[in-house]
Amino acid sequence: MTKMKESEKNTAPEKVLTRKDITKLGWRSSLLQASFNYERMQSGGFLLAQMDCLKKIYKDDKEGLSEAMTDNLEFINTHPNLVGFLMGLLVSLEEAKENRSTIKGLKVALFAPLAGIGDAIFWFTILPIVAGISASMAMSGSIVGPLLFFAVYLSIFILRVAWTHAGYNLGLKAVDTLREYSGIISKVATILGVTVIGGLIASYVHISLLPEIVINASKTVSIQKDFLDKIFPNILPFTYTLLMYFFLKKKKMSPVVLIAATFGLAILLSFLGIL
Amino acid sequence: MAITLAQGIALAVMAIIVGVDFWLEALFIFRPIIVCTLTGIILGNVPLGLMAGGLTELAFAGLTPAGGTQPPNPVLAGVMTTVIAYTTGKDPATAIGLALPFSFLMQYIILFYYSSFSLFMKKADKYAEEADGKSLARLNMLTTGIVAITYGVVVFLCAYVAQDAMQSLVKAMPEWLTHGFEIAGGILPAVGFGMLLKVMLKGEFVPYLILGFVIASFVPFSNLLPVAVVGMALALIVFNNERNNKKMAVASSAAFEGEGDDENEGI
């Protein structure tokens, strides 16, 4: 059976997918998480998004279609914003009737690096920057804040179609480049992200001590304004964030526990008049 | 102020739309800045929605589903912060804390679905074997539909049905307790940033964290764009260095391999 497929491969299969099909695949890549679950993660949506292309490639070959479907139902967990790239690449291989183990191997090799790059760029870099800017606009009462946020993410959404075309057109050429550069790209994105987080800590975590030391009837010294702020502004937010990092990373504590503890502590210190 | 039945239904419909968006991570209209603004529009108090949106967005800045972990639910946080501030007249900064239990509730419902939707995968395997694309599409519609309806029902119950109970609870709270919630809302981003750092911060990146912090602490500017621009510059420096290193490594190893080839030919 497999032997027959190998021989079929020699007669170069014709292209059946049009530009329009690939554009549609890009939009449909948004279905990635439609049946997200812990057993296979995104596999159900991953297959569904590619269904139209696969049907067009395999036409009456029910067995070939079934094999392709079964392969694509295997565990996958990657990034919704970049998955179109992977889908474009895979359907180009399906269309060329590459053998199944090549297609499967590439999918397994690429989905995790794509997820890493996507998380570093979209969650850890773009979101903090865009959210920081648009939130400060919204808080000063400007509707431009949420509109700006929406505009940025709409553009990112539309770019999904571009990634899909890129994956389809580059085909196997893309794989080497991606393997070569994925390390550098995620490192560079992390540097940008970490720098912004440093800024976010200073700007958006607010801890301010209330107590004042009474020196005499006319003079009091505020611990926050006259002491801490003079030594190093925002030192308490920085320390508390690092403390959270320590508990999350080294003590493997759940964020829910830390959120609850933060509330408990804040309420206690409010009761005591310290915060 | 009270929420009318019509507003309750409108909020439920909105929650279905943004909830599905969160499920798919598509347009990012599930982020609090959008959800609060839409809630404000539905309640007829846009300034409140904007204020709540900015505050909640920042409080949830680090709480992301990156790496397959489910964060406290941003949709419920957004809707309930705005709703609680509207019905009780409390400051949105206080309302963030009061909205948090609702956010946790939805987080656990989604986690329950993540586990139970595993049961559908046996069916999906069968459809794949039969090359049945239509049934596969139906299965995906069903799971997404279940999530959508849940968002609608939960938001309707929390925002409309429970509003009187919520109001009397908040009225019974002493001043130090509401003040506690308010300052907790201001500290909350620390947990989110801690989560981001847990994923991103390795020893080699510590200098960048310090730089970003120091710039934002000492440069008086209304947003973080200067920090982002400096970060971009640092990233470009590293990118250029790494690329050059790579090129040199490739060049030297190519030269090395070339020598090896010559030797082989000699033998």
Image (cartoon, rainbow, N blue to C red):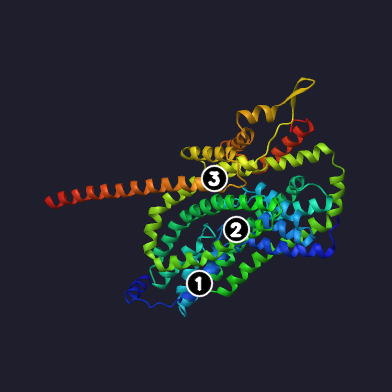
Q: Position of residue A56 (x, y in %)?
A: 48, 77
In the rendered structure, which amino acid carries the disc numbered 1?
Thr
In the rendered structure, which amino acid carries the disc numbered 3?
Val
Q: Position of residue B77 (x, y in %)?
A: 71, 52
Q: What residue did someone put label 2 on?
A: A37
> Few, some or many C-alpha atoms within 10 Å of disc 3 (few <14, some 14-19, many ≥20)?
many
CA separation, marks 2 and 1?
27 Å
Q: What residue did someone put label 1 on?
A: A23
Q: Position of residue B153 (x, y in %)?
A: 76, 61
SS for tag 2? loop
Q: Position of residue A107 (x, y in %)?
A: 45, 61
**Which dot marks residue B227?**
3
A111 relative to B24 in the view: left or right: left
Determine the residue positioned at 55% across, 53% down: A126
B23 relative to A76 in the view: left or right: right
In the rendered structure, which amino acid carries the disc numbered 2?
Asn
Q: Is residue A167 visible?
A: yes
A274 relative to B31 in the view: left or right: right
**Which dot marks residue A204?**
none
Q: Earlier in the sequence, mark 2 or mark 1?
A: 1
Farthest residue to the left: give it. B266
